[in-house]
Amino acid sequence: MPQSPKLPPPPPSAPPAAAPHPPLPAAATSADVARLAGVSRATVSYVLNNAEAVRISEPTRRKVREAAEELGYVPHAAARSLRAGHTRIVLLPTSHVPAGPLYSSFLNALQWALRRLDYTVVQYGSLGLTGDQAARAWAELRPVAVISLGEIVLSAQNVETLKRAGARAVITLGPVGVPGAHACVMDQAEVGLRAAAHLIERRHRRIGVIVPEEEGLDLFSAPRLEGARTAADGVAVIEPLPMAYTEESARALAARWRTHGPDAVFAYNDEYAMLLMRALQDEGLRVPEDVAVMGADDLLIGRLLRPRLSTVRIEMPTGDHLAALVDRAVREPSEPPARHDLMSATAVPRESTRTA
Amino acid sequence: MPQSPKLPPPPPSAPPAAAPHPPLPAAATSADVARLAGVSRATVSYVLNNAEAVRISEPTRRKVREAAEELGYVPHAAARSLRAGHTRIVLLPTSHVPAGPLYSSFLNALQWALRRLDYTVVQYGSLGLTGDQAARAWAELRPVAVISLGEIVLSAQNVETLKRAGARAVITLGPVGVPGAHACVMDQAEVGLRAAAHLIERRHRRIGVIVPEEEGLDLFSAPRLEGARTAADGVAVIEPLPMAYTEESARALAARWRTHGPDAVFAYNDEYAMLLMRALQDEGLRVPEDVAVMGADDLLIGRLLRPRLSTVRIEMPTGDHLAALVDRAVREPSEPPARHDLMSATAVPRESTRTA
DNA sequence: TTGAAAGCGGTACCAG
DNA sequence: CTGGTACCGCTTTCAA
């Protein structure tokens, strides 16, 4: 729909040149169908939309249907929604889509469920936009709902912009709620808390927490670190350990371990844990005797490693669940924005941490 | 935009009830801005779009800008594109988004690059639609380009529907080209071919090929299997081995290995390879002495395993590359749909297959 | 330099 | 039961 957003200053491409060679017949409009069927546009609309309010004779219906078929008529969504005054767009902003398999399958399910409910999911890349810019850009599409993953921090102001533009529901999935928006909190802090608690219970008092250096993950890693701190609260000390998802980075970290290393580490997730554990083992340290290693996400790889990786299992809401929630919010905008806690986390003890 | 697609028969939700409690002031239109600024709607349009063709006095510009600001004016994308006769939508149908990290980061990059080029990426969940249904559903949005991942098989007919609806480029990424569409072939067969060739070169003559049981992967696994067959061509025998991405499935397969197993296996990708290799090892088989194992995708995990996993590295086109290609196709629809080979694959020998 | 007005494609009201 | 018609919000001639 948008054709030349004025918003941020990207290098816009020149306007498309006029169509050249095979001047394909332009798309048929409802007027064309009407003409061919020998009826009015109104009738075409009634028939094609199965309007209940009005009775059209069977012969007429058939004529219209056939004409539409013959012309390959496809209604124009923009025109329709312009007239209707609202869309069925659910806008899903994405900057960095976090790579995790968990998360991406969740998003897939969500999209699928929304589609079933007859919404059109528009994934809008919003990398590098501020809350204000983003809100306006999104508002142009007049989405009926916005599901913000929390990568962009929305102000109450921004939420209002969206609502005034027709959004019946603004839902944030991030760790923090926004005034005016429905908050479906997926509290990543819980993950860090469970991990740290598990380690503390096993008498570890110096706990390293891997903080991925990859950008775009802060939204997950920061709360996880915070959660660990909460669990530690006086009884243990938490040491943030920056690490990139590369062998070199893991090796460098492992090399310093004998002298500086804590005796337990929460490795952000199973993938980082695998990487670090390998480096630790190559360095000659024993897991869990010398270092306990804890992952998160309960990926299959964790069970394949030796020692088997202790982890934090995360219960994500199903996509259908969230989709239903969106649908309800859209249909009952009267209900005040509520706050739902959708995520839970539990520690799964395996071999890479000692038994309690 | 769509508000009640008539297409497939999904359980549609009831139309949203009228807004209830806090009757938020409706979104401001350009007419509102014009009124507040004391000018005409035309002037508003000129100012806000920085129209070159017409000179507006500085004081007027400021008045308009301030009025727009004050009202929180956000242009209506649907109205704009209706008037313009075209959109900047790039439609990206998705059914099952293939899970692989490679692929998902490629898609991310693509979206990002398109956004930079000023396109709006609409991800449209198309699960369970036939080519005909899909083409019509997509055409409703009047996208300027469609990038089909190949999960849905388009006919020449369908491509025409899309083009008539304004699509200047229909691009398929799948393994097969469609008449009338630009084909950016990412030939998965190449992957299987490289893997099998690598194993054959190492004197393996019975080569198992893992075929994931997970649905949605056939588009990748089938060509990979075919490619392996091509490489084998008489000199070796290829045995398709169905396996699910679960420990049980891998274990069951491994249990039969001593009696029935081939002496080499191409495991579809590194993740399946890891799973299978673990099961094989637990079964007491040695890798690579008893069984050579080959993965694909060159994931980091492959280097962390012991033995280190031989794999096939895939060079995907960068997202920017494809985005540029889309942009070119949009701007020069005169150029006949071309066929681009975008993917290349090379074997990376490591420890899980014998040295040549 | 600015304003009036004609649509873009559909939908829905009101007459006939 | 069907046709005429007035919009939805925005861009863009054409006149003034």
Image (cartoon, coloured by chain):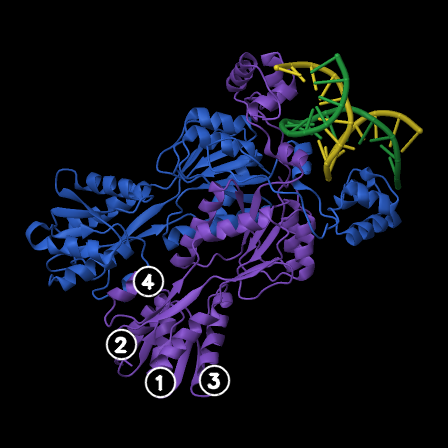
Chain colours: A purple, B blue, C green, D yellow
Q: Is residue A220 left or right of residue A161?
A: left
Name the spot of residue B110 as percent of width and height, x first: 49, 48
Q: Residues within 10 Å of mark 4 (few under 14, many from 20)?
A: some
Q: Is residue A145 above or below residue B93?
A: below
Location of mark 4 (residue): A299
- Between discs 3 and 4, the one toward the N terminus: 3
- Between discs 2 and 4, the one toward the N terminus: 2
Q: Is residue C15 left or right of residue B283?
A: right
Q: Residues within 10 Å of mark 3 (few under 14, many from 20)?
A: few
Q: Chain of mark 4?
A: A
Report how far apart the C-alphas of labels 2 and 3 lie in the structure: 30 Å
- Between discs 1 and 3, the one toward the N terminus: 1
Please tell me which residue is depicted at 83% across the width and 48% down the height of the picture: B64
Report how far apart the C-alphas of labels 4 and 1 lie in the structure: 24 Å
Name the spot of residue A37 as percent of width and height, x first: 58, 13
Please tell me which residue is depicted at 46% across the width and 46% down the height of the picture: A113
Q: Tell me if residue A29 can be seen.
A: no
Location of mark 2 (residue): A281
Amino acid on which disc 4 is placed: Leu
Circle 3 — which element?
loop
Q: Are marks 3 and 4 on the same chain?
A: yes
